[in-house]
Amino acid sequence: MMSVSIKTKQIMAVTAIVFFAVALMGVFYLLSIAEVLVQETRTRADLLAGGLFNRAANLALEGGDLRASLAQDAGLRSILQMANLSDQAMYAAVVDTQGVAIAHSDPAQAGMPVASYPSIDTLVDAGPVETLRAIFTKGGLTREVRLPLVLDTTSFGTITVAVSTLLIRDDLEKALRPAAWTAALLLLGSVVVSTLLAQWTLRPILLIRAGLARLGRGEAGVTLSLPQEGEYGDLGESFNVVSARLAAGPASPASEVQVSRATVSKRLAALGRVSSGIAHEVKNPLNAMGIHLELLKMQIHDLAAECAAERPGVAEDALEHVRVLSQQMRRLDEVVQGFLTFARPDALFLAPVSVPSLVNEMIAVVNAEADKTGVTVIVNCPPDLPPVLGDAGQLQQAFLNLALNGCQAMPHGGELRISARRADPGHLAVIIEDTGTGIAPEHLDKIFNLYFSTRPGGSGVGLALVYRTIHLHDGDIEVQSVPGHGTTFRVTLPLAETASAS
């Protein structure tokens, strides 16, 4: 699976937030414009129907054959022709009680039956979501405004103005074009701004990576020129100090063994300080994005609550995308925190350490974990074993991690064995073996990699920390596993007397 850089993730997160915010506002804008256009169409149709009614009423006052007058009156025909000039109206007609057109905006339709359609009021009262659905129905829908033509208490017929949602759709699409261009410009601007922000935020990482590459090629006295304010100044100072110490090298061959433990630990601690600054610079924009994401989530909740009756389901999709973004940002924060934990080791306090005593001190914690799944713990560490040279706290944490991993690999019970014995001359071996699920062969060479884990929900940091701790003590760790039959970890550490003699 292709890895994605922090810079790319930051650009994607900012762009996605802007996209969903714009999309949500666009949906509400679309619904509002559709509602306004339908209301405006009904108002124009009402005005046209009212003009026809007034003209018919005046003709009735003049006397004579009203039907003939309606069919021949030039003023009435002028008003009917206004329907042909409207963007939404299909036609207008004066219809008698039999449904036949006395006068029509299309003269060819005069004397012909006029079809009846649902009132446009049903479209207005349906709400914006149903209105939008009707507007974009394939083929369009026809609605009409009907005004009863009642003169002197006598019903003479009706005045009908027909409108098409297909014509309303054309007006809606025209109104949305400027909004679509604005949304596209906003998205493009968010990509540009997030790219510049990512470059500015991650610039110290790129500089430090280049400096580390130069150190790896053997260059001496490599320095970084970072801004002096805030954490940038601390990063540059820490790196320059480490570079100067590496350039100085060991004072003499006699001090080389001491450098392999205490001095290396100090150098790793210094590099840990650099990593801490890097993690801080990465976590700051992550925290800011997380805060704004939560604010956006609250606003979507408020809008959804206010519009629940009229616009059901509008905000659910946006909320789901916001949840995914929030989950991925939390995962990225955990990755940065795990890297910081791994890259910032504590200083080593070397002293003779009794391995049996370490095991006895941690066995209570191991038994508590083992009791959860019915695991039996067997300890075989003779008390007369010679001590090793190491940091008691760090070694105990390493052994505890291995033992707890063994318990978690046996969810249905099993047996965990912890033993210690003399190994090669000058070394002590600590063996931790379980009868659990085992590790697949293709994973054996990866289990000590940072962030690699075969357990669902595992952080992938524990075994990497164990590996680092053992090697800081000039030791070694091996693993053997058979899927379905268990796993064995074998740790070898130099004895205190051997290390002192060297």
Image (spheres, grey):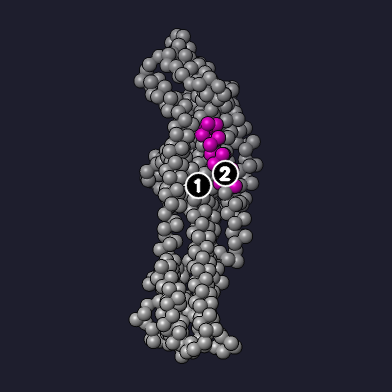
Q: Earlier in the sequence, mark 1 or mark 2?
A: 1
Task: Report the residue at 43% width, 13% height from top.
Answer: 221
Q: Classify 35 as above or below 274.
A: below
The residue stretch that appears in magenta: 279-295
Task: Point out residue 79 in the picture as x, y percentages from the top left corner.
Answer: 45, 73
The one nearer the camera, 402 or 183, is 183
Q: Which residue is mark 2?
A: 292
Q: Main secondary structure of the magenta part?
A: helix
Tell which residue pokes out farthest to the top in this image. 252
Task: Report the residue at 40% width, 63% height from top.
Answer: 170
Task: Point out residue 418 in the picture as x, y percentages from the top left corner.
Answer: 55, 40
Pointers 1 and 2 in contact (C-beta within 8 Å)? yes
The one nearer the camera, 374 or 97, is 97
Q: Is residue 291 magenta?
A: yes
Q: Mark 2 falls on what kind of element?
A: helix
Are there few (<14), some (14-19), or many (20+) residues within 10 Å of tag 2?
few
The answer to whether residue 162 is seen in the rendering is no
Q: Classify 443 as above or below 139.
A: above
Task: Report the residue at 42% width, 28% height from top.
Answer: 206
Q: Mark 1 falls on what kind of element?
A: helix
Q: Classify 14 as above or below 222.
A: below
Q: Amino acid at mark 1?
A: Ile
Q: Classify 327 as above or below 51.
A: above
Task: Report the residue at 46% width, 19% height from top.
Answer: 225
Are there few (<14), some (14-19), or many (20+) residues within 10 Å of tag 1?
many
Which numbered tag is attached to residue 17?
Answer: 1
